[in-house]
């Protein structure tokens, strides 16, 4: 078992402009948390959505079945409830409905007590030209760091 679990959504910062970040707890079953502790989860294709009662759920999050679970195992792509304060939920729901923003999972981690937490971000989708600029900036930074490294040696 790994001690530090930090599962990232690498596509989130490329596809979206993150405006605000929150840390939310997740409601999980026994075999789900065991699979996460083994590092067998993915949030690359997932997103967050509100239901009719104003509760926030993460959808399309992949948690592989626990190998020793037997017939008590969980569904790999079930909807999982996110836990936030009422004030934060109302603020997020207002932003999503009013301005057409979306909520994206950024990373999934275990805190000091061993509980699974998820960083979520209020995000606005990027256009294609914004993505090209991101790629260009990343390449320029990489080239600059290579030049600095060669210059120092």
Image: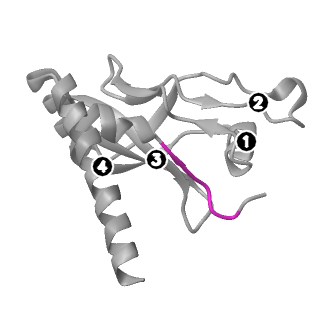
Mark 2: secondary structure:
loop
Q: Earlier in the sequence, mark 2 or mark 1?
A: 1
- Characterize the local packing of mark 3: few (<14), some (14-19) or many (20 or more) Cα atoms within 10 angstroms: many
Q: Nearer the viewer, mark 1 or mark 4?
A: 4
Q: Nearer the viewer, residue 2 or 92?
A: 2
- Identify the residue under disc 2: 65
**Residue plotted at (71% across, 31% down):** 64
**Residue at image mark 1:** 35
Q: Which residues are magenta?
A: 3-8
Number of labels in the image equals 4
SS state under label 4: helix
Reading the image, the residue beneath label 3 is 107
Question: Can you give x and y, in whole percent of width and height, for residue 130 in the image?
Answer: 17, 32
Distance between mark 1 and mark 3 Cα atoms: 16 Å
Q: For residue 100, what is the image quadrant?
A: top left
Is there CB contact under 8 Å for labels 2 and 1?
Answer: yes
Marks 1,4: beta carbons within 8 A: no
Q: Position of residue 24 (x, y in %)?
A: 41, 47
Which residue is tagged 4?
138
Q: Is residue 9 left or right of residue 103?
A: right
Verify whether residue 6 appears in magenta. yes
């Amino acid at each position: 078992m790994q001690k530090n679990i930090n599962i990232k959504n690498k596509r989130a910062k490329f596809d979206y402009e993150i405006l605000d970040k929150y840390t939310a707890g997740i409601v999980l079953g026994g075999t789900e948390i065991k699979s996460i502790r083994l590092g067998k989860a993915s949030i690359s294709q997932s997103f967050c959505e509100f239901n009719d009662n104003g509760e926030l759920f993460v959808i399309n999050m992949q948690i592989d079945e626990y190998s020793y679970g037997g017939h008590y195992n969980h569904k790999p792509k079930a909807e999982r409830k996110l836990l936030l304060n009422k004030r934060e939920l109302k603020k997020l729901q207002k932003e999503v409905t009013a301005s057409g923003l979306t909520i994206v999972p950024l990373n999934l981690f275990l805190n000091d007590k061993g509980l699974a937490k998820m960083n979520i971000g209020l995000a606005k989708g990027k256009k294609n030209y914004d993505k090209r600029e991101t790629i260009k900036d990343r390449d320029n930074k990489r080239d600059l760091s290579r030049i600095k490294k060669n210059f120092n040696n």
